[in-house]
Image: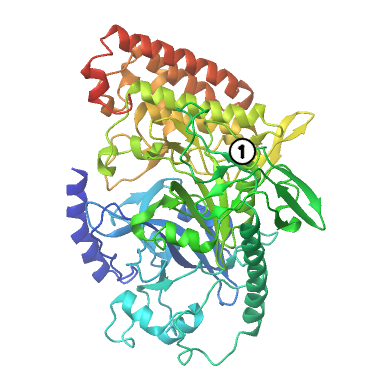
Amino acid sequence: MAALSISLALPLILFLWTTLPSASHSTPLNCSDTTRICTSFLAFKTSQSTTSTLIQSMFDATPSDLTADPAASPGYVFVRKNCSCAAASRMYFANTTFTVRDHDGPVFPMISDAYRGLAFMPNTSRRAKVGAVVGLHLLCGCSSGLWNYLMSYVMEEGDTVESLSSRFGVSMDSIETANGMSDPNSIVIGDVYYIPLNSVPGQPYLVNSGDSASPSPAPAPLFYDISGDTGKHSSKFPYGWVIGSMGVALFLIAVVFLSCIAFKTLHCCGRQRTNRTKDPNQPTSHKFHILKSTSFCYPSGGYFCCRSSTVKSSAGDIGNHQINIPKGMFADGFNMEKPIVFTYEEILVSTDAFSDANLLGHGTYGSVYYGVLRDQEVAIKRMTATKTNEFMAEMNVLCKVHHASLVELIGYAASNDDLFLVYEYAQKGSLKNHLHEPQNKGHTSLSWISRVQIALDAARGLEYIHEHTKTNYVHRDIKTSNILLDGSFRAKISDFGLAKLLVRTADGEASATRVVGTFGYLAPEYLRDGFATTKSDVYAFGVVLFELISGKEATTRTEGTTMTNNERRSLASIMLGALKNSPNSMSMASLKEHIDPNLVDLYPHDCVFKTAMLAKQCVDDDPVLRPDMKQVVISLSHILLSSVEWEAALAGNSQVFSGLVQGR
């Protein structure tokens, strides 16, 4: 029915685009691979009244998703979005929500005015009241492979293919090819055109104290002309940009040079990576080592130097040597342990030059690729060189913490434009892929016991960083896409780019910070005050529990709405409403309506009810009333034991339970 609604609505949308003067005449890009997801950008033209908070709300983006073009007048903000191929329409879209703020009435003119042609909605005749949240589609595109990204740009008065070529550092031929243009002079003002890019556009987006939408005038650009077509560029030479680029390039070259020296002299911080399911006394087939405190570091001449026991790899014996890493880059975060340094060439070969076939998905701050390094499967996160803070955050945390329920960091690499983190590979991918429309993603559904085991694994990982590490951390981005599953469906928490060190205060523990994370998982006090605590992570974990029960996403379409009425609510509010009418496991008809139908009624009612009640405690508005992760671990342990007993009582050893659903 949903697909039918879209197919019926699309002709109307296309008709209105050609008849309404206030709307963009642009049509979405066609696509064929419905599993395709890519990183794209949208160039949003700002005004003096545009604030960073407004932009984030309009595009469902975080501050880290925004970069800016300080040379443009008026200013432009570049918004990073995940673009996907819609199965029903076979067109590229990115989704967002729009909150009606000014007045009641038709929404379509508000959308056209607010997004300046970058967005459209399926139901152009819809009316809404102030405060209503409306679902929208953003015009985006995925590159065919010739370029890394496509950026959606609304053509303005005075724009030409030549001026865009000069402005964004790409050849005119590339722009014409990306848009299928036969005549570069026949551009249409107000239409969306796609600018091919090989690097992230703009500069880091910084706001002034007044939260204006103008970026801080930093001279370092992120555009590079790789076409060699200089004859078509503007005659005005950008001296400031060139000088800034040279400074950044020299710094990165120095880092890469030191990394290469380090790689040739020592593999630092090694412990033999072992398979936890095997006898640790048996020899392992792994070719390199994961972090462990079997190495030691000492200050030497402005550098941190590490020594390690002999390590053999496919590259030969490179053990018992010394690695020099600039103290300024890693500060004091690596005074105990260091990762392995890989060369960029190794990364490039292992990922087949970052081919789409090796793309596993997109993390908070970069794309993740499958690779084989020295005969071992790995996951490699590719981040732009501007993401140094997030790169260092993950390094600082994962070099110090080691737990079966945390993804292990193996090493890192760097190039002129990118930074790379190398992790152990999780064969089954993210929990999100197994919960939300798993059949469409090539997976079968998880059994109830598998879901409880995954929840318990993730809870143990959180408990570890909250309470049992030398310095405690708050993750700040717990969600199903950051919970990975290994070959045995055991969970590991990943993506520590937003992790923060907890600061102990007289009133408790908190880390004052800007609000980051994913909507639907953010605790109310964190949104209000910007203080991240362990209880912020507990709230997000409660949402994950609700997702495990319901199979729905953290923000979901209001029950009973259609594709033409895309108001969205948080899953937590929906599940809490169901629990109000479900006093116990014997009277949980309201809750049962929200249990994942993929479980096909194969679950113990009392265990599901206890899990839902635990999730309810985790998402309590008052953080003091939320349990800590130690209590959550204890509760889930009891629930898992009861679930196993339930399965055993119903012939759990038969083909019925072990073969009907995956994860046993």
- In front of the other: 156 or 203: 203
x%, y% of residue 262? 65, 58
Instruction: Estimate how packed mark 1 is, as few (under 14), some (14 to 19) or many (20 or more) residues with alpha carbons within 10 Å.
Output: many
- In front of the other: 319 or 460: 319
Residue type marked 1: Tyr
x%, y% of residue 576? 44, 25
Q: Is residue 620 left or right of residue 82?
A: right
Image quadrant in which the C terminus is located: top left
Point out the residue furthest to the right here: 301
- Which colour scheme appears in the figure? rainbow
| Residue 97 makes an appearance in the image | no
Q: Is residue 136 left or right of residue 123?
A: right
Q: Work out whether 419 lies above or below 279.
A: below
| Residue 46 makes an appearance in the image | yes
Point out the residue furthest to the front here: 317
x%, y% of residue 177? 32, 78
Point out the residue furthest to the top here: 649
- In front of the other: 198 or 255: 255
Q: Work out whether 85 lies above or below 632.
A: below
Q: Residue at x 44, y 64 (%)?
A: 41
Image quadrant in which the N terminus is located: top left
Q: Secondary structure at mark 1?
A: helix
x%, y% of residue 616? 49, 22
Residue 401 found in image quarter: top right
Q: Is residue 8 left or right of residue 296?
A: left
- Count up the numbered dots: 1
Q: Which residue is mark 1?
A: 526
Q: Residue at x 51, y 15 (%)?
A: 635
